[in-house]
Amino acid sequence: MASGRLPDFVIAGAPKAGTTALHAALTTHPQLYLSPVKEPKYYLTDGRPPSRAGHRGPGDAHSAQEWVWRREDYLALFDDAPAGAVVGESTPFYLYDRAAHARVAADVPDVKIIAVVRDPVDRAWSNWVHLRADGLEPEADFLSAVRREPQRVADGWAPFWHYRGLGRYGEQLRDLYRHVPRERVLVLRYRELVDTPRELLDRVSRFLGVATGLAHTVAPENVKPFVHDTARHRALSALARSGAALGAHVHPRIWRRLSAPLITAMHAGRAPRPTMPVEVRREVLEPLLADIALLEELTGESFADWRRDTGRGHFAARGRTAGSA
């Protein structure tokens, strides 16, 4: 095995819960070093390229090409870390992937894990908006897409399509604690990252053993626009899915460059995100209630706000609210 530095900590999840914003904020801390490649996904692999059988959804095979699965490539991500820096990386699917729990714990016995959790219905909604905006989600109705999840999982669509599954944080933490002691796992809430970022960053700094008051937030770059279902968007989305399938056979940088005008054209139809109907929220939430109870049992915190008929909105909207408070 190649020798080299391994991360002291990982931001392990959850997708669409502010991990990109947290990663960006922590890179501003002079005593921290985060890998220049966000989401290397190394511990999702066993030292082999990701299996095609688990990447059968639109764009999955193209995305899988970007995984850093060779150990020497992963270790090289930390080559430029200054002496004495606390080193980390962010791959929000580590929390969901049970094999990743075992791999990271075995490879980095003293690893610290940061998990950011978000209202699971809001998270799933944001996940769907993200995939729709880029033309990959073929289902124009959020609830219908959620209902299709079991079949998509069975068909080998990648984890980012697991709308409800990614939000089962109670089960994920329960399984993570079998490999990593609780005192080395920091569970944060998305709402804290948006509403009280300085306090949250100080909490993370203390957890990582670095000075407080040095990290600062960075404007979010991972907020996708809501795009209405129009004939134009359907046509562009079909083209995007076809292109993504072809993109699986070329270098990701080439496909990103070629697809950029198409994505810009799809995003031109952006509109304000509509309010989720109460009956939709209730249906998506109901199978997750037992997991929320488990999360409360594991953390000793209340997540009663997640059981309400209304969510808390997306990052940009919450950020505006916090900024005006």
Image (cartoon, rainbow, N blue to C red):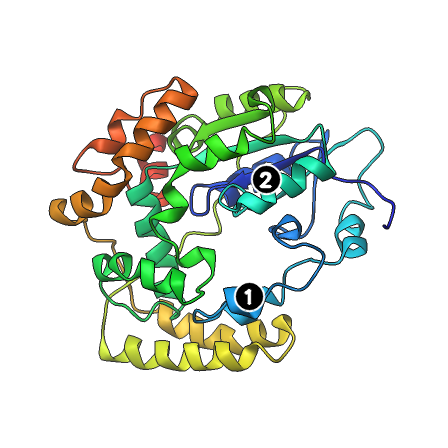
Q: Residues within 10 Å of mark 1 (few under 14, many from 20)?
A: some
Residue appearing at x 25%, y 55% in the figure: 272
- Label 2 to label 1: alpha-carbon separation: 22 Å
- Give the side of residue 194 with respect to residue 80, left or right: left
Q: Work out whether 176 lies above or below 314.
A: above
Residue 232 position, x and y percent, is: 28, 79
As shown in the figure, which amino acid type bears the numbered disc 1? Ser
Residue 306 position, x and y percent, is: 26, 32
According to the picture, the residue beneath numbered tag 2 turns out to be: 101
Report which quarter residue 134 is drawn in.
Answer: bottom left
- Taking the image as drawn, is residue 169 in sight? yes
Residue 246 position, x and y percent, is: 53, 82
Residue appearing at x 22%, y 74% in the figure: 230
**Mark 2 or 1: the one toward you:** 2
Report which quarter residue 240 is drawn in.
Answer: bottom left
The C terminus lies in quadrant: top left
> Total number of numbered labels?
2
Q: Work out whether 6 lies above or below 161.
A: above
Residue appearing at x 51%, y 41% in the figure: 95
- Labels 2 and 1 touching (C-beta < 8 A): no
Q: Secondary structure at mark 2?
A: helix
- Taking the image as drawn, is residue 324 in sight? no
Q: Which mark is residue 63?
A: 1
Q: Residues within 10 Å of mark 2 (few under 14, many from 20)?
A: many
